[in-house]
């Protein structure tokens, strides 16, 4: 779809949603009995749902394949990232163990150098 068509579709979607919201607010402030207002609100909600469903379905049809493609394309990068993180964790754990051994040796030798 061309960019201009997408902009027109976005504007149209915004206009429909804005109109429905405006109508709902108008009903809330209209001087009529509560039962009539609630009835009109229900009707407006049904109309909104009827108009919104095709837009949501259309968006889902467009977005879901893009998300799946992004997930597929990112899988190798994600796997490489996980492997690199695991490698770094192993390196850090190795250095911690080395440092623990070094500290233990220093404590051992420090105890041997005390005067009697």
Image (spheres, helix red, strand yellow):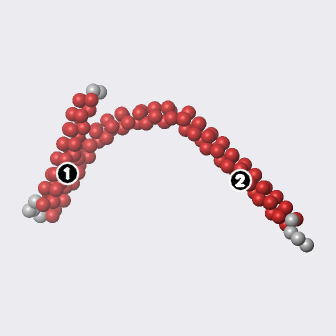
Residue 33, x across and y down, in percent:
12, 64
Q: Is residue 22 left or right of residue 92?
A: left
Quarter of the picture containing the C terminus is bottom right
Between discs 1 and 2, the one toward the N terminus: 1
Q: Is residue 111 left or right of residue 63?
A: right
Q: Which of labels 1 and 2 is toward the front?
A: 2
Eyeballing the image, is 63 above or below 104? above
Report helix, strand or loop for mark 1: helix
Q: Quadrant of residue 12?
A: top left
- Which residue is at the front of the view, 21 or 110? 110
Residue 1, x across and y down, in percent:
29, 27
Q: In the rendered image, is residue 37 in sight?
A: no
The residue positioned 16% from the left and 51% from the top of the image is 22
Report helix, strand or loop for mark 2: helix
Q: Which residue is mark 2?
A: 96
Q: Residues within 10 Å of mark 2 (few under 14, many from 20)?
A: few
- Which residue is at the front of the view, 71 or 103? 103
Q: Which residue is mark 1?
A: 21
């Amino acid at each position: 779809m061309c960019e201009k068509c997408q902009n027109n579709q976005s504007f149209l979607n915004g206009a429909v949603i804005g109109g429905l919201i405006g109508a709902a607010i108008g009903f809330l402030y209209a001087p009529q009995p509560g039962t009539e207002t609630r009835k009109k609100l229900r009707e407006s909600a049904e109309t909104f749902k009827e108009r919104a469903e095709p837009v949501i379905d259309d968006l889902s049809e467009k977005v879901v394949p893009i998300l799946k493609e992004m997930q597929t394309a990112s899988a190798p990068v994600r796997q490489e990232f996980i492997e690199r993180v695991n490698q770094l964790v192993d390196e850090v754990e190795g250095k911690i163990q080395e440092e623990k051994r070094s500290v233990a040796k220093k404590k051992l030798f420090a105890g041997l150098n005390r005067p009697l």
